[in-house]
Amino acid sequence: MSEIIFFEPKGPLFLKDLFDHIPKDNYKTKIFDIKTLENASSKDLTFFNSTRYNEQASKTKAIACITKKSLGEYLPRKCIKVFVKNVLFSTAKVTKKLYPSADLDYLDSSISVVSRISSKYRSVTFGKNILIGKGVKIGSKTSIGHNTVIEKKVIIGNNCLIGSNVTLRNTIIGNNVVIQDGCKIGVKGFGFIPMSDKNFRFPHIGRVILQDNVELGANCTIDRGSIGDTFIGENTFVDNQVHMAHNVKVGKNCMIAGQVGFAGSTTIGNNVSIGGQAGVSGHLNIGNNVRIGGGSGVVKDIPDNATVMGYPAVPLKDFIKKK
């Protein structure tokens, strides 16, 4: 799965092509891609914007990092520090240079009507009016519902059930996965830099990865990752009308009820249960075996084995006392 990419970088580019103010000694440093702190190689650029990620920063293998002066000390010596005023804005501009077409979901011109290429998928059951892009792989005994669009390079495993009016792009799906009607998977997330005259869209170059035995209810929206991936672990069941923003990572055996919303870059542990209409803020860590009551608003990290409820969410005993 790690080798499959949906967006090809324009690089390599020199550091001097990406930034206005670079020491001459680093002008000819080649940048092949931009990746997260933990995934970057010695050919890649990365970014570092918060002390929350100090540990990942200290271990990054990136050749260069966009960051603030106050954070430079946490990065390895050999990593070139590119100091900027606004890390996210600079990261968005550089990503746009490396991936010019990832800021919006443009038309997939490789799409074909499945009836023209059905011989490639002899063990798949298709409904009516299905469109499939170039390089799509679909496993045996999988069923695809009416009016569904599967864009280029998407991978679907064996024995999956994909409903009607589903859109799949930038997505890798395991075996025995159920995606019910109306889901939109792998779409661009709500990422932009607010500007006074015209907002700057943050390109989203990541993927959505659904592991084996995941189930998504009707009309869920799962955004692809911005730089990394959005991920849902094995045997996690998601109810109708749930939204997951870019880079959210959900563990195994989780149960998420209807109309729950996740902001970007939050990590959910294993065996987590979340009641309906709860909201989870971004860049949080929710531990294993956590229970979150319906309608709660989670704005802080939650440790393992905790049960919380309310807005803001507090331990259940404290919530009951307030009542």
Image (spheres, rainbow, N blue to C red):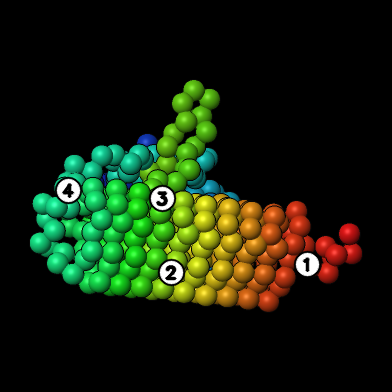
Which residue sits at x=63%, y=76%? 289
**Which quadrant is the C terminus positioned in?**
bottom right
Q: What's the mark number on residue 214?
A: 2
The label on residue 113 is 4
Which of marks 2 and 3 precedes in the sequence?
3
| Place of residue 111 in the rendered image (x, y in percent of width and height, measured from the top left) | 19, 46
Q: CA distance from mark 2 to mark 1?
A: 29 Å
Question: What is the spatial separation of the Cα atoms under label 3 and label 4, in whole angstroms?
Answer: 19 Å
Q: Residues within 10 Å of mark 4 (few under 14, many from 20)?
A: some
Q: Which of disc 4 and disc 3 is earlier in sequence? A: 4
Q: Are marks 4 and 2 in contact (CB under 8 Å)?
A: no
Q: Earlier in the sequence, mark 3 or mark 1?
A: 3
Query: 154 and 114: which one is in front?
Result: 114
Q: Amino acid at mark 4?
A: Val
Above or below for 128 versus 300? above
Q: Tell me if residue 289 comes above or below residue 194 in the rendering.
A: below
Q: Nearer the viewer, residue 226 or 92?
A: 226
